[in-house]
Amino acid sequence: MDGLKRAAVFCILDCGDSFLLLKRDKNPNKGKFVPPGGKIEPYETPYDAMLREVKEETGLEINDIKFCGLLSETSPTSYNWISFIYIATIPKVEIIACDEGEFHWIQKSDLLKTDIPSTDKYIYQFVANQQPFVLHAIYDKNLIMTEISEEFSGEILFKKEG
């Protein structure tokens, strides 16, 4: 069904001064740097999906995990998601090959200069402040973000003019 929200997870892998991010080879977010994650399978909890996706994409079995918040993405196209977002502390590890793209260690100080999805700069700000969040991102038909708001505060974080 068009417009039906699909459920996904992703996990920010934190190693002190850097994050382990995937430069995606596939849509959505092709060419952008994202945390490992993916769709929640039928009968799977978000937590279990996150553990599975991290293991499948990185080979890592993680355990120092914290739930951070939710991201709801809405568009007039088939791109409509609700994502459960986690963070895990990991040691600096050797990067393995992944069929979704290529992993890179990205310095936290370089994160906002890196090609990340438009929603992620807001996510990383909440995560850095250890502040739970429920973000709602709205896109136009070209999948350009036109607005993002945070539900707990009711604050509109960004609204495209025009």
Image (cartoon, grey):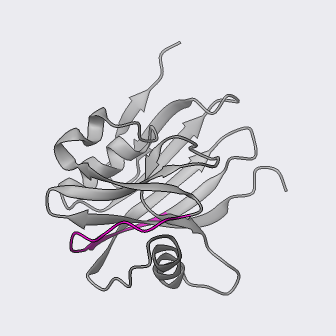
- Residue 142 quadrant: top right
Q: Position of residue 109 (x, y in %)?
A: 17, 42
Q: Is residue 7 left or right of residue 147?
A: right
Q: Position of residue 159 (x, y in %)?
A: 44, 27
Q: Is residue 86 magenta?
A: yes
Residue at (30% x, 86% y) in the render: 63
Q: How many marks?
A: 0
Give the residue at the far right of this rendering: 1
Q: Is residue 12 left or right of residue 9?
A: left
- Residue 115 quadrant: top left
- Residue 18 quadrant: bottom left
Q: Position of residue 9 (x, y in %)?
A: 51, 67
Q: What secondary structure do most residues of the magenta stretch adopt?
A: loop
Q: Is residue 142 above or below residue 101?
A: above
Residue at (53% x, 64% y) in the render: 98
Please indicate, yes or no, whether residue 154 appears anywhere in the rendered image: no
Residue at (53% x, 32% y) in the render: 145
Q: Which residues are magenta?
A: 84-98
Please indicate, yes or no, whether residue 15 appears anywhere in the rendered image: yes
Q: Is residue 119 magenta?
A: no
Residue at (62% x, 74% y) in the render: 40
**Quarter in which the N terminus is drawn:** bottom right
Q: Position of residue 158 (x, y in %)?
A: 39, 31
